[in-house]
Image (tube, rainbow, N blue to C red):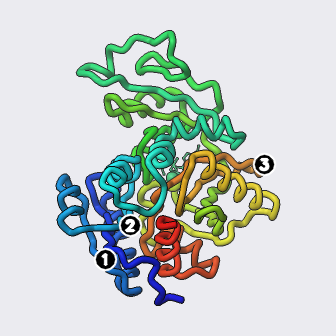
Amino acid sequence: MSDILVTDKKIAVLMGGTSEEREVSLRSGQAIFNALKEMGYNCQAVDVGPDITDVLRKQQIEFAFLALHGGKGENGAMQGLLEVLGIPYTGSGILASALAMDKEASKKIFAFSGIPVAPSLIIACKSGEDALSSVAHDEDSAGIYYYPDFPMPNFLLPWVVKPADEGSSIGVSMVKDAAELRSCLEKTFVPGRRVMVEKYIRGREIHICILGDRVLGGVEVRPSTEFYDYDAKYTAGMTEYVIPPELDYETYERVKSLALRACMVIGCTGISRVDFMVDDDGIPHILEVNTLPGMTATSLVPKIAASAGMSFNDLIREMIRLAIN
Ligand SMILES: Nc1ncnc2c1ncn2[C@@H]1O[C@H](COP(=O)(O)OP(=O)(O)O)[C@@H](O)[C@H]1O
Ligand SMILES: [Mg+2]
């Protein structure tokens, strides 16, 4: 089976780019490139820069395998460029990518669709020179508050503070005392951006991998740190991974079906990873959908695939097949 090529098109593995997750993306890209080469695909690795349109044209690329994480590679922008150029690509399209990347937008859709979410508050920082000091409270805020006039969350501490549209736990921090919230926001804010203050859910962290319209499996993530931060994600030995998660049968089934529903309501295609916190009462709270999950040799999706009997090469081939059909 492994020597059947899904396509003879010229493939570019798009990786790197300028996002905060550049380094991880290069590792995902290299692993994907190696797998494609090993299987005999006509492929080349492309580090995405401002000249990407010219590179794709000059190299006569006919298919893009996306190994980008975060920023313009994951938020629908690259997907839009590829659509305009008429180059098919792996994974989710423009809208699903944009929605999944934006924790505020996707959370509204999850809540509307009956997928349990943790209580949260969105605080925005208007752009402009003295944005951090001069913004008046907006009466018609539609649930969004502008710094510095925001109400204290009406849900219990501790809180997790995170940018609404970043990934890889960048800028994520915990607040245990309400008096710390203001200084924490000041550290997290970038003018023009929004921050989500979310109730901290104590319990088990479960990630589910969706491939096409089926659940591939799940993993329980047990970081040695307080939460699954950047170091716990990318430093060997700092996190324990348990496959399958240690959940009772019914809870696991429920988390899996919620993950599938989350991908459906956002409109994801190809591969996605859906992250949950399951509280001590067994109630799952969705954290986010990742439309371009890590694909390094040690990433979670390849681990889950392996537990389902799928090698890394099988997974890569299936991702191409889903993108072409
Ligand atoms: N509400 C929460 N309760 C408990 N832990 C959380 C919560 N939100 C985030 N975390 C922790 O922070 C990590 C990163 O948060 P996440 O929402 O997935 O953002 P990112 O896009 O940066 O990965 C999660 O994997 C989890 O360990
Ligand atoms: Mg996450």
Determine whether the beta carbon of the residue marked 1 sits less than 8 angstroms from the nearest atom of ligand 2: no
Q: Is residue 270 left or right of residue 24?
A: right
Residue under label 1: 43
- Of tags 1 and 3, the one toward the viewer is 1
Separation of residues labelled 2 and 1 (CA atoms) = 9 Å
Residue indicated by mark 3? 281
* Position of the N terminus by quadrant: bottom right
**Whether residue 59 can be seen here:** yes
Q: Image height check: is 77 above or below 272?
A: above
Q: Identify the residue at image location x=47%, y=60%.
A: 91
**Quick check: marks 2 and 1 in contact, CB under 8 Å?**
yes
Q: Which mark is residue 65?
A: 2
Q: How many marks?
A: 3
Q: What whole-number distance in Å separates the C-alpha atoms at marks 2 and 3?
A: 40 Å
The crowding category of the residue bearing disc 1, from other C-alpha atoms within 10 Å (few below 14, some 14 to 19, many at least 20), is many
Q: Are marks 2 and 3 in contact (CB under 8 Å)?
A: no
The quarter holding residue 14 reads bottom left
The kind of secondary structure element at disc 3 is: loop
Q: Earlier in the sequence, mark 2 or mark 3?
A: 2
Q: CA distance from mark 1 to mark 3?
A: 48 Å
Which residue sits at x=39%, y=61%? 88
Q: Residues within 10 Å of mark 2 (few under 14, many from 20)?
A: many
